[in-house]
Image (cartoon, rainbow, N blue to C red):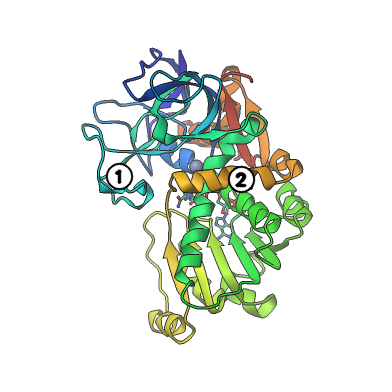
Amino acid sequence: MKAIAVQPGAGVPDVIKRPVPEPAPGEALVRIHRVGVDGTDYEVIEGSHGGAPEGDDRLVLGHEAVGVVDDPTDTGLEAGQYVVPTVRRPPPGTETNEYFEHGEPDMAPEGAYVERGIVGAHGFMAEYITSPAEFLVPISADLAPWGFLVEPLSITEKALEHARASRSAFGWQPDAALVLGTGSLGLLTAAMFSAADDFERVYCLGRKDRPHPVIDIIERLGATYIDSRETPVAEIPAAYEPMDLIYEATGYAKHAFESIDALAPNGVAALLGVPSDWTFEIDGGRLHRELVLHNKAVVGTVNSNRGHFEAAVDTLADLPDWVLEAIVTGIYGLESVDRAFPNATAHAATADDESAGTPDDDTTIKTAVEFTAI
Ligand code: NDP
Ligand code: ZN
């Protein structure tokens, strides 16, 4: 079968041949339909995040997948059932640990998990995968074409659950929500916040010039676009309003601290970005005081568990088709894999020859690779 693999930090994604995997007892064989590409994939390709399984120099990419059960073996699943696989698995050589036993692998510390397609385990960009049934979340056939969005939506389900939990000791009634970042995670989250009745007003911060398709999406959602070059995050309360909830999806480390200033009293900021090391100056005393005197919270959140995937399937069903079609700017077959990773090829061209680099494609929001059509 064909799969898409990369040598993290040393290449662009390539189509390779691998044997069709044999399901072990308790595992189903799943034929992959589509797999999404996101910022994490680029971090893996560049070698700044994740890595190949031990003893392998290449990693099969892909952690945002939807497929159909081809051979259920003894799992109790039905052949033909569409499924979305979750991402974390117990480390190689172990069957489980307390986090997996509690259904909370998303809370496992480093070393207590691998992540398929990201770190230590091959991913889902292959014609077939195998997986224990407990890691396969059913999805209806009519939602399956968009099923690769369930994983990123589940990331926001978890972030929201943790943000709400941090405010659960009092009668928190959020009105204004701010999403930082107009990448695929930021836009999907802005769409989720706008579709749900949870927030009266939704804002989304980016750094795009008008006119831009991303700004069109934000405004069609009924949300307000904020340009970070004109209004830095810390100045948002004065220019717009203080925010009850901030969802950071830029990976821009200063936003973690500027968010404290942008929050309303009793507000919470959920940090999702994964920045590299960066040393800069902040007024730690003032920010510490701000957190304390205004009951503010900052929570970091990563990954998601099966419950978040199940919630994300329901959320996906509530999102309007136009927004999914606008965010997913391209779905490509194996013959044009490079188009699914436009930024990886641009980076590689730049690395080989400074002058040969094509600029990063600024209109691509989210792509997916299609292995088999439905
Ligand atoms: P992208 O790289 O596609 O999106 C990041 C966005 O942030 C881009 O649109 C970028 O703008 C924007 N941005 C960066 N810096 C600034 C700034 N100073 N002002 C305004 N906008 C800015 O990534 P994703 O959407 O896929 O993911 C977002 C982040 O979340 C990443 O750091 C990723 O690693 C992380 N992530 C975390 C997960 C978790 O479980 N915690 C799961 C998945 C992703 P531009 O387009 O102009 O470059
Ligand atoms: Zn992802």
Q: Which residue is located at x 26 percent, y 39 percent?
A: 96
Residue most extreme to the front? 76
On the image, the x and y values in percent for residue 21 come to: 38, 17
Task: Tell me: 132 left or right of 36.
Answer: left
Horizontal side of residue 263 vs 302, given as left or right: right
* Vertical position of residue 310 compared to residue 137: above or below: below
Residue 118 position in % (x across, y down):
39, 37
Q: Position of residue 112 (x, y in %)?
A: 26, 45
Q: What residue is disc 1 on?
A: 101
Mark 2 is surrounded, within 10 Å at the Cα level, by few (under 14), some (14 to 19) or many (20 or more) other residues, namely few
Q: Does dot 2 land on a helix, a strand or a loop?
A: helix
Asked whether 233 or 350 is in front, the reply is 233
Q: Which residue is mark 2?
A: 314
> Dividing the picture into quarters, in which one does residue 245 lie?
bottom right
The residue type indicated by label 2 comes to Asp
Q: Residue at image x 62%, y 25%?
A: 332
**Residue 365 to residue 223: above or below:** above
Counting the numbered discs, the total is: 2
